[in-house]
Amino acid sequence: MKPSLTGHLGQYITDHRKKLIEQVLNHRTRHITLVLEDIYQSQNASATVRTAECLGLQDIHIIEHENKYGTNKKVLKGSNKWINIHRYKMKGFNNTEICFRNLREQGYRLVVADPSPDGKPVHEVLVDSKIALVMGNELKGSSDFALNQADEKIFIPMYGFTESFNISVSAAICLHTLLTKVKDSNTAWNLSSDEKEALRLEWYRKSVRRSDLIEQEFLRMNQ
């Protein structure tokens, strides 16, 4: 059997680090993904990305219309290094429509966060199928297109005088609620073996200094 690149790079990684990578892989999911539509404050986008990564999401979809996706490194704390960020930013196109079509082709149900009375509390959402949680702009909320195309609208029950949470807080509450329900169900929410292996190699590369040179030498020796 030919030696694997993952195994070769693993020689340069501590056992503690490899154990952590396996723990994270075992909690990663694509059963739920997050969509951010036209977020304009970089600290909000960064905090939401960090929250999603901490909770175990592997993919985040970012829609850009009026506002370009910006980051705040102090808030991100490197979280974007370990996830896949998919950006939709084509000029002259409805990027929300493109994103939604892409997600539906992958089997996702589009669940849009919105305080409208025809929505349902987030804890009542069924989690037996894949969910794309859509969070709208901090000021205007989700676009009319997103609301009209939603498979479901949800809200977070609130009991104070203030009308809304910060977007990163809203995302944290919704994601934690949905993920807890998924993990308490019989739904197969984990990554596949192939997905884990692909990410393991990617994360090993990011964990080893000058991994590109080590990889080149490995490939040359095993042609």
Image (spheres, grey):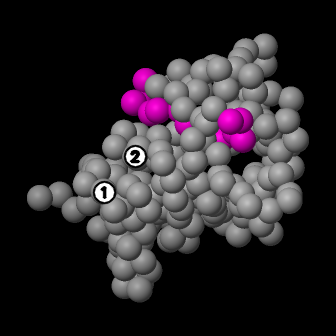
Q: Residue at x 46, y 25 (%)?
A: 104
Magenta residues? 105-117
Mark 1: give few (<14), some (14-19) or many (20+) Cα within 10 Å. few
Q: Position of residue 83 (x, y in %)?
A: 55, 54
Q: How much space separates mark 1 and mark 2, taking CA atoms?
A: 8 Å
Asked if the stretch drawn in magenta spans residue 57, the answer is: no
Mark drawn on residue 185: 1
* Sooner in the amino-acid sequence: mark 1 or mark 2: 2
| Above or below, 18 relative to 34 | below
| Above or below, 127 relative to 52 | above
Q: Residue at x 54, y 61 (%)?
A: 176
Residue under numbered circle 2: 127
Asked if the stretch drawn in magenta spans residue 116, the answer is: yes
In which quarter of the view is residue 53 placed?
bottom right
Q: Position of residue 173 (x, y in %)?
A: 62, 60
**188 or 85: nearer the viewer:** 188
Q: Position of residue 222 (x, y in %)?
A: 26, 55
**193 or 155: nearer the viewer:** 155
Q: Position of residue 139 (x, y in %)?
A: 88, 41
In which quarter of the view is residue 153 placed?
top right
Secondary structure, mark 2, is: loop
Q: Residue at x 80, y 53 (%)?
A: 164
Residue 28 seen in render: no
Q: Residue at x 86, y 59 (%)?
A: 161
